């Protein structure tokens, strides 16, 4: 092993889409047949090397400080490919050596007209989505890809020793689902002994290539699992007993992001791994007794939030580091999670005010924060000015105009239980029957119709100034008229206007509410080539003017049937934005709810009697630990009720939930008190 000391500052992961979404563009061009595999590979190499050089330039200069976390599509899909864990239903995609080529890799992710893709679901408490492995008794495992090794070798040949990355064995199996061929009682974790030799073989190949460290991510250890804690503990012990015993291997860096490790901290501390990364931004600093169990292992303290975009309170982080130094023999500093969940560089956002930019830290700025805090371990006096500057900026943020508004705070303080409750359902039902005259089982649609290329082109032209506001609005009205006529022709009972004027169900509201801002280049990966641009909720939220009323009023003028007003709910607006970190989420949700409550009142005044408040993200924000879930469900349900409880009895409230499994929160859904 060429190197024994872990860098004192490092990054567990970095955005892989490219600063201008170069990966998205290259991958989609490949799918469309516009470039070949060689051109795609060249684009990927350029992104990988650009990332490595960028992080070196930001101060992560030591060997293994830069993570090798690139992926064409998804890190779990990469693990499937490397472990040879391709479901039997995709067997036709494998070559004679049991390997996937790049087309087969993408087929697992996207499917074909004849093959369903792998299931996709949320990656812990982020807005990223991963592909779910399908594991059964029939699954065969072998080292079936060399890409991780090749990427390491390419970076090394270009002057950067990266830290290769793969999802760890326990997390890989805990995130898997049983294959269709498995019996009902089959547990993918039962295949651990078959998976570990493949990981061992990969470690040997990485060592032969010159890797000094390898990162294995085990975030499943911070989540309450259906599998018992005892079984998970045994799996962790066995995994790292086997992997640490590999004769020729890189040193093992195990990362546990997205929350407190809790009981499994001691389990990992007792293994023969070489470094343990924990999230001490969300999770508490472990006790001195727990830390002492690390012995000579390096503790990598994730003190910088990798999950949100706010400037780190460097002094608070310095205090945590000082506490850790009392007990920990070897200490390194990092972000709490991969920074793949935030945009690349806040300096690109020149349309944001200088004040707001000073409050923010995207991936590049977080790397600098890590380097600064790591300086506390080597040259504390040199980094003190940067710590003092961060303290000054954070204090100025608290006093800045719009962050705390007296009118918003007074309205929140005046809320009573009555503001969260509508009349009994029976009273509402009678009033709605009289007002709406709907059949017993009325038909409607969810709301948004396809954003056609014509709509997108019109919006782009309007944004560039090539269309006047009047011209753009007329094009949108023409589309609304077409959609209304189509629904009338099809015989729907409650109509929608199709939302052609909305660029995004959250951003549209963010652009029209005080306390929000939007970025130009702030893209993050949702899944594969799909990127989103979350809005920034930085201050107290209020509505200065109606947002959707004119469009709904116009649509209603086209039909005698009820037209639905369409709003995005408070929880979803929070879930799909970067939200202020200086007050509880529940308080922010109630501010958004009051803005929506005002919008509902104006829709009613305009004659709209059916209003849909979408909450597709209600399940998404559910905390990873069961002990935290009841409090979340309480405030999230209350924020929805606050937004809708001002509606008249004769107004029918709809909601729409999607993208998730709702079994665990069915009581909360009932508590929304829609209709």
Image (cartoon, rainbow, N blue to C red):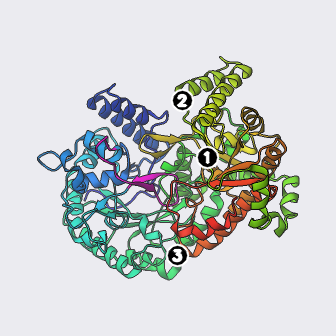
Secondary structure beneath dot 3 equals loop
Q: Quadrant of residue 440?
A: bottom right
Please state, as top left, top right, bottom left or bottom right, where the N terminus lies in the image.
bottom left
Count numbered badges in the picture: 3
Q: Residue 149: x, y in percent?
A: 25, 48
Q: Is residue 599 visible?
A: yes
- For the residues bearing labels 3 and 1, Cβ distance under 8 angstroms: no
In whole angstroms, how far apart are the C-alphas of marks 1 and 2?
A: 21 Å
Please state, as top left, top right, bottom left or bottom right, where the C terminus lies in the image.
bottom right
Q: Which secondary structure class fits the magenta region best?
A: loop
Say above or below: 116 vs 553. below
Residue 614 on the magenta span: no
First to last magenta residue range: 111-131
Position of 300 compared to 533: left or right? Answer: left
Frontmost residue, 556 versus 670: 556
For marks 1 and 2, the one nearer the N-term is: 1
The residue beneath circle 1 is 444
- Tell me the number on the disc at residue 452: 2
Q: Residue 70: x, y in percent?
A: 37, 45
Position of 541 compared to 657: left or right? Answer: right
Residue 115 on the magenta span: yes
Position of 28 compared to 289: left or right? Answer: left
Tag nearer the camera, 3 or 2: 2
Residue at image coords 35%, 79%: 231
Secondary structure beneath dot 2 equals loop
Frontmost residue, 91 versus 498: 498
The residue beneath circle 3 is 286
Extreme residue toward the left, this view? 96
């Amino acid at each position: 092993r060429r190197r024994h000391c872990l860098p004192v500052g490092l990054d567990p992961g970095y955005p892989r889409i490219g600063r201008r979404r170069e990966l998205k563009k290259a991958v989609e061009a490949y799918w469309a047949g516009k470039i070949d595999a060689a051109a795609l590979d060249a684009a990927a190499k350029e992104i990988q090397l650009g990332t490595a050089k960028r992080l070196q330039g930001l101060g992560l200069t030591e060997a293994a400080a830069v993570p090798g976390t690139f992926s064409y599509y998804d890190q779990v899909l990469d693990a499937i490919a490397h472990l040879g864990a391709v479901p039997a239903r995709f067997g036709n995609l494998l070559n004679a050596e049991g390997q996937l080529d790049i087309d087969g890799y993408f087929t697992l992710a996207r499917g074909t007209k004849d093959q369903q893709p792998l299931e996709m679901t949320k990656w812990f408490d982020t807005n990223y989505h991963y592909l779910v492995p399908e594991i059964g008794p029939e699954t065969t495992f072998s080292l079936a890809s060399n890409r991780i090794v090749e990427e390491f070798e390419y970076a090394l040949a270009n002057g950067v020793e990266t830290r290769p990355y793969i999802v760890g064995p326990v997390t890989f199996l805990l995130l898997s689902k049983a294959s269709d061929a498995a019996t009902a009682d089959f547990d993918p974790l039962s295949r651990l002994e078959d998976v570990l030799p493949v990981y061992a073989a990969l470690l040997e190949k990485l060592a032969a290539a010159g890797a000094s460290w390898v990162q294995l991510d085990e975030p499943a250890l911070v989540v309450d699992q259906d599998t018992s804690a005892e079984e998970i503990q045994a799996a962790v012990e066995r995994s790292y007993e086997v992997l640490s015993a590999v004769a020729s291997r890189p040193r093992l860096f195990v990362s546990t992001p997205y929350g407190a490790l809790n009981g499994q901290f001691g389990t990992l501390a007792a293994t023969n791994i070489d470094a343990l990364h924990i999230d001490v931004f969300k999770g508490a600093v472990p006790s001195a007794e727990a830390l002492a169990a690390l012995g000579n292992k390096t503790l990598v303290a994730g003190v910088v939030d990798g999950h949100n975009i706010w400037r780190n309170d460097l002094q608070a982080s310095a205090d945590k580091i000082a506490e850790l130094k009392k007990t920990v023999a070897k200490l390194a500093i990092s972000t709490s999670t991969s920074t793949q969940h935030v945009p690349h560089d806040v300096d690109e956002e020149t349309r944001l005010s200088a004040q707001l930019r000073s409050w923010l830290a995207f991936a590049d700025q977080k790397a600098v924060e890590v380097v600064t805090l790591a300086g506390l371990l080597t040259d504390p006096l040199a980094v003190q000015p940067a710590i003092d500057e961060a303290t000054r900026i954070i204090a100025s943020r608290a006093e800045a105009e719009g962050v705390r508004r007296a009118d918003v705070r007074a309205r929140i303080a005046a809320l009573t239980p009555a503001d969260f409750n509508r009349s009994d359902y029976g009273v509402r039902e009678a009033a709605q029957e009289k007002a709406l005259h709907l059949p017993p089982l009325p038909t409607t649609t969810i709301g948004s119709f396809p954003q056609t290329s014509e709509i997108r082109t019109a919006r782009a032209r309007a944004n560039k100034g090539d269309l006047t506001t009047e011209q753009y609005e007329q094009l949108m009205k023409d589309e609304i008229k077409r959609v209304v006529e189509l629904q009338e022709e099809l015989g729907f009972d409650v109509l929608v206007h199709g939302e052609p004027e909305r660029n995004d169900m959250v951003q549209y509201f963010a652009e029209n509410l005080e306390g929000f801002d939007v970025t130009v280049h702030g893209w993050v990966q949702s899944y594969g080539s799909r990127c989103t641009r979350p809005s920034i909720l930085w201050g107290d939220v209020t509505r200065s003017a109606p947002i959707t009323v004119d469009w709904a009023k116009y649509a209603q003028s086209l039909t005698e049937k009820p037209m639905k007003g369409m709003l995005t709910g408070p929880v979803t607006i929070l879930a799909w934005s970067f939200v202020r970190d200086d007050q509880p989420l529940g308080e922010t949700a109630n501010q958004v709810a009051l803005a929506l409550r005002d919008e509902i009142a104006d829709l009613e005044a305009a004659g709209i009697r059916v209003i849909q408040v979408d909450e597709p993200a209600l399940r998404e924000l559910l905390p990873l630990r069961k002990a935290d879930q009841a409090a979340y469900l309480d405030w999230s349900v209350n924020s929805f009720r606050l937004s809708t409880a001002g509606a008249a009895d004769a107004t029918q409230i709809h909601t729409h939930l999607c993208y998730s499994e709702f079994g665990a929160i069915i009581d909360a859904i009932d508590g929304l008190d829609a209709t």
